[in-house]
Amino acid sequence: MLGAVNIDKPAIKVDIPDIISVSACADLTLPPGAGLCIDTINGPIYLVAETWESLDGWIDAIRLVYTTLQEERVMFLQAS
């Protein structure tokens, strides 16, 4: 495949119910790029995007999934 990149890195799994907060961060210990901190009940997870625009997309996607999960929980509790 032309342009395909083979990256032999393990996938990062974050259980959405474990998320406490998601925020952009600028930490000198992170590699260059746009930093993301996902604070979970098990401790923070740091990711780095190539651009701040990419990071905004990551944050929006995580918040959308988190909000959807919370709404489903509320509907389930109301139905019980």
Image (cartoon, helix red, strand yellow):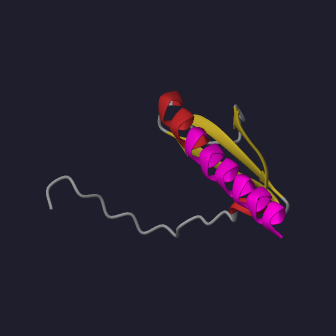
Q: Measuring 72% from the left and 53% from the top, which residue is drawn there?
A: 71
Percent of width and height locating residue 60: 58, 39
Percent of width and height locating residue 78: 82, 61
Looking at the image, which is closer to me, 7 or 12? 12
Percent of width and height locating residue 14: 66, 63
Q: Is residue 66 above or below residue 16?
A: above
Residue 24 magenta: no
Evaluate whether residue 33 shows in this view: no
Q: Quadrant of residue 34?
A: top right
Evaluate whether residue 1 shows in this view: yes
Q: Is residue 12 above or below residue 50?
A: below
Q: Measuring 14% from the left and 56% from the top, which residue is drawn there?
A: 2
Tell me the magenta residue range: 60-80
Q: Is residue 52 above or below residue 19?
A: above
Percent of width and height locating residue 24: 68, 34
Q: Measuring 51% from the left and 37% from the top, which residue is drawn there?
A: 57
